[in-house]
Amino acid sequence: MPSDKPDMTPEEMDPNLRWHPQRVTRAMRESHNGHRSVLVWFTGLPSSGKSTLAHGLEERLFADGRGAYVLDGDNVRHGLCRDLGFAEQDRAENIRRIGEVANLFLDAGIITLAAFISPFAADRRKVRELVGAESFIEVYCRCPVEVCEARDEKGNYAKAKAGVIARFTGISAPYQAPATPDLVLDTDRTGIGQSISAVLSLLSQRGVIAKSEGGHAA
């Protein structure tokens, strides 16, 4: 597990800053919440079902009394990342910022659900390294681009094909699918309820949440 203190070189550290150690630790918060904190990272093409699944899972976890929060790709671009575009370097910075925010949520003992296209494997790997492999669960929402396009309520696929939107993932920008995700959900064939159950089952297997007496995630 990564240290609470950032790993920075002397050149990177501002001499006017000092790391202040916390008295309430992540382990204490996890114990108080009754579950571990992990980052569930949903990746996939636009309109592959990432946000729908993340918000549905958040609702289920909340109803079960667990601390969970969704970091949604569109939502963070309304505030935290509103200054970023969609060039490759901006996409990388977008994911870097989200990784840092997610790391804070993990320290707070929250099950963090991140729904981002995150098209580049290197950017997802950096987030995994930041939070620690034991705290990172990668869920690949796999869906054919034709199905994603048919689902697209915002019409972005059509705009991308018409040249109105540049660098649109799946049309004019690449998507690098995960090589070894922790879970693959074929969202063109798997309903939202079944997908949520699959993620809950994985969280239970990883010891993030407890199992009920019937063997299901409680």
Image (spheres, grey):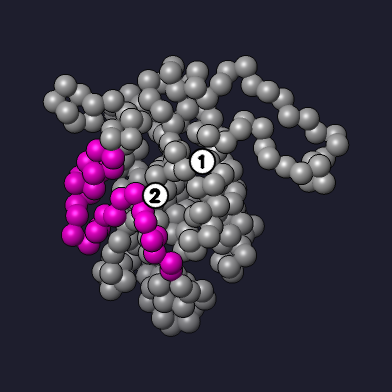
Left or right of 134, for residue 144: left
Q: Residue at x 13, y 25 (%)?
A: 214
Residue 124 placement (x, y as % from top left): 49, 55
Outermost right residue: 15
- Measured in 3D between alpha carbons, the distance from the residue under mark 2 to the one under mark 1, in whole angstroms, is 12 Å
Query: Is residue 51 rendered to the left or right of residue 166?
Result: left
Query: Residue at the location (34% across, 62% down)?
Result: 47
* Residue 189: assigned label: none
Q: Of discs 2 and 1, which sits in the foreground?
A: 1
- The answer to which quarter of the image holds residue 208 is top left
Q: Residue at x 44, y 31 (%)?
A: 37
Tell me residue 104's x, y (percent).
56, 35
The range drawn in magenta is 175-202
Image coordinates for residue 42, horizontal then vertical, percent:
39, 51
Residue drawn at the location 68% of the way across and 40% of the way down: 7
Quick one: label 2 or label 1, which is nearer the N terminus? Answer: 1
Query: Helix, strand or loop at disc 2?
Result: strand
Residue placed under numbered mark 1 in the picture: 132
| Residue 186 covered by magenta stretch | yes
Q: Is residue 79 magenta?
A: no
Confirm or deny contact between disc 2 and disc 1 (CB under 8 A).
no
Most foreground residue, 95 or 70: 95
Q: Which residue is mark 2?
A: 138
Residue 190 appears anywhere in the view: yes
